[in-house]
Amino acid sequence: MGVPDTLVPSSNRFSPRFGVAYSPGATSGLLSKITGGPGNSSIRAGYGIYYSVIEGNTMAVDEPQPPYGLSYTSPGPPLFATPFITAANGSFTGNPFPLIVPSTNVSVKNPNTTQNFSGFIPQQGMTAPVPWDTYPYTENYFLSLQRQFGQKMMLSASYVGSQSHHLLLVYSANPGNPALCLSLSQVTQVAPGSPTCGPFGEETIYTSAAGVVYNGTRQGLGPDYGNDDYDATIGNASFNALELTLRYTTANLGFLIGYTWSKSIDQASSISDPGNPYDFAATRALSGFDIPQNFVASYQYNLPFERFFGHIRGVTTGWQISGITRISTGFPVTMHSDGDNSLMGSNPNGVNNYSLDLPDYNGGPLYLGNQKAISAHCPFLQPGIYYFDPCSFGLNAMGTPGNAGRRSFIGPGEINFDLALLKTFTISESKTLQFRLEAFNAFNHANFLGPASVNGDISSSLFGQVVSAAPPREVQGAVKFFF
């Protein structure tokens, strides 16, 4: 049966949703054996479009820079004691504190002429939405089959998918022009005394050999601006999954087993992932939260001590063991570079956490998780535990963003058992006392912590190494009183 369109107040758009459900009623033949007869199986399918709102935190990062703003982005590593002075050359940006509040009648026709802006140029670190932003929406669809076996067990198999549109993508509003920088990168290409262009040189003034003066290589907002970003709803994502569930319940034993085989792909998994301003599709890769395979089982069992030792009230009754087991593949390893070989100047500004640049992949084997093979193939490694072969990557070629995928392979997986032994004493009809002994990561398996467990920054000396671990085995006791 269909569901009529519904209006979503937050976006003032219609959101169509449709669903069907069918339970086979065959009472004989092969179909009856497969479906279990009337009332024992069902087939469901659905489709819907769901609108959302633009992320609220984009307003939080839309802060102006000095002299009127509270946010400040240093053009280089600053001095701690005097954060408005660049450590490398001692240049003074200008202290915006105390904050100068402009007059309320300031406008384009009535500009403020009392403030000297030269110390605050280039303006950088600002993020703003584009005028054509619109509401994100997702198309969700699924097909599921359920089969019941008697009164104790049920099996479910589902295909679940989604296509997301108009997601937020952060990209440089004033990127450097790589071709222009390369044309000014050699001494023979510039006038005598002029600097040559290279990484992090987007704001430098150059004079070509022909005498043409370039006020930096940035294009879009002009030379008075550095790396400033747009928040634009131009991103897309997709998710597809096979989901299997088996549930079994009796008086003494119960378990729920779930398995998911999935893939999630996007252009940016959060606003900290910068987009390529010249090719928005270039950063499309596995999502930072993608887990291709995930197996989870939860279970509880009433220990039958009284069956073997007889009924001894308070001794052989009330014992239970329960637990959760998870076995899964890891998160994708996020690759990036803190350099600027791309010559785009998309350096971190407090919104995006790292540069746009990616390493170059030379086609060599990765030897994922094989420490012995990695050490043999890459003999000059720093001490550490490596998950992939760093010798298969190099810095991106000058003027290119790098050919390695932002996330193209999966990090170390997880095997974890959380177990609990429970003893319950019945005090009265409404009051019970329970003693619990719980062990997390009961078998002390070495697991690694989340998407950042492997260092994918080729600019770091830890590139390729496992850098964070999940907690070891932890055991705790507890007492619970129910009333």
Image: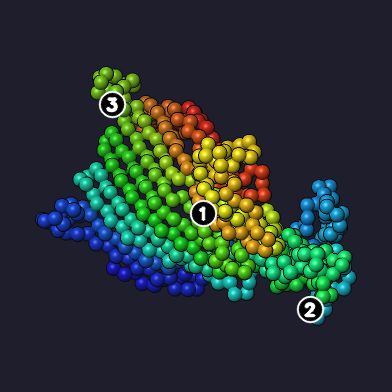
Q: Quadrant of the C terminus?
A: top left
Judge from the rendering whether residue 407 lies leftward or rightward of residue 311; answer left or right.
Answer: right
Kindly report the distance in space between the C-alpha atoms of the residues bearing marks 1 and 2: 48 Å
| Circle 1 residue | 408
What colour scheme was applied to this rendering of the protein? rainbow
Q: Quadrant of the N terminus?
A: bottom left
| Circle 3 residue | 304
Residue 427 picture quarter: top left
| Circle 2 residue | 108
Q: Are marks 3 and 1 in contact (CB under 8 Å)?
A: no
Q: Residues within 10 Å of mark 2 (few under 14, many from 20)?
A: few
Residue 6 picture quarter: bottom left
Percent from the top left, x then y, of residue 122?
79, 65
- Mark nearer the N terminus (2 vs 3): 2
Kindly report the distance in space between the C-alpha atoms of the residues bearing marks 3 and 1: 49 Å
Q: Residue at x 70, y 63 (%)?
A: 343
Q: Is residue 155 visible?
A: yes
User: What's the mark number on residue 288?
Assistant: none
Percent from the top left, x then y, of residue 14?
44, 73
Give the amino acid type for the residue marked by disc 1 in the picture: Ser
Front residue of this view, candidates 190 and 155: 190
